[in-house]
Image (spheres, rainbow, N blue to C red):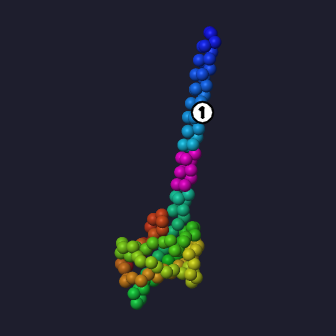
């Protein structure tokens, strides 16, 4: 085996190592992204499983709809980031109090009152950014 064969074999080996390193790095980066996506999905699933709301009552007086609800889950909710559907139609803006205080922090096992300027509906849906939390039907 001559010198040229040794140089050629060395170049081929160097190329194989370089390509192998790049493939390994790309595979690692991809695996890291998949792992991060799995962790995010698991966190969302846990949030959804630990979130629960019960609508205790819905009443209307003088054009103001009052909705009494309890955060019956294990997750603290933001009362200001919820949405209401009244008979399937998005409700206008609303005001809220949590345990008689005007705060957005709605801890587990506490009550909140929401007021919306609207006529009495036959159905109310309370939703968060992750989907429906509670339903009420007349």
In the rendered image, the quadrant that contains the N terminus is top right
Residue at 36% across / 78% down in the picture?
Answer: 122
Name of the residue lying farthest toward the bottom: 62
Residue at 58% across / 40% down in the picture?
Answer: 28
Left or right: 50 in relation to 2: left
Please say whether residue 113 is one of the residues in the magenta stretch.
Answer: no
Prevailing SS of the magenta stretch: helix
Residue at 53% across / 51% down in the picture?
Answer: 37
Q: In the structure shown, which secondary structural element does the residue marked by tag 1 occupy?
A: helix
Residue 94 x, y percent position in the rendering: 46, 79
Say if residue 10 shows up in the picture: yes
Residue 57 x, y percent position in the rendering: 45, 81
* Residue annotated with mark 1: 21
Name of the residue lying farthest toward the front: 4
Residue 8 x, y percent position in the rendering: 59, 17
In the rendered view, would you say 48 is above or below 86?
Answer: above
In the rendered view, would you say 44 is above or below 11?
Answer: below
Segment colored magenta: 32-41
Residue 101 x, y percent position in the rendering: 58, 82
In the rendered image, the quadrant that contains the C terminus is bottom left
Residue at 57% across / 78% down in the picture?
Answer: 103
């Amino acid at each position: 085996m001559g010198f040229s064969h040794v140089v050629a074999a060395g170049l081929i080996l160097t190329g194989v190592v370089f390509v192998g390193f790049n493939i390994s790095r790309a595979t690692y980066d991809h695996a890291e992204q998949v792992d991060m996506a799995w962790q995010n999905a698991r966190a969302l699933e846990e949030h959804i499983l630990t979130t629960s709301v019960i609508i205790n009552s819905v009443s209307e007086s003088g054009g103001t709809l009052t909705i009494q609800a309890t955060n019956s889950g294990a997750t603290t909710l933001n009362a200001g980031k919820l949405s209401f559907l009244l008979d399937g139609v998005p409700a206008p803006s609303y005001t809220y109090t949590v345990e008689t205080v005007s705060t957005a922090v709605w801890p587990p096992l506490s009550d909140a009152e929401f007021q919306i300027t609207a006529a009495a509906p036959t159905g109310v849906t309370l939703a968060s950014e992750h989907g429906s939390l509670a339903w009420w039907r007349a």
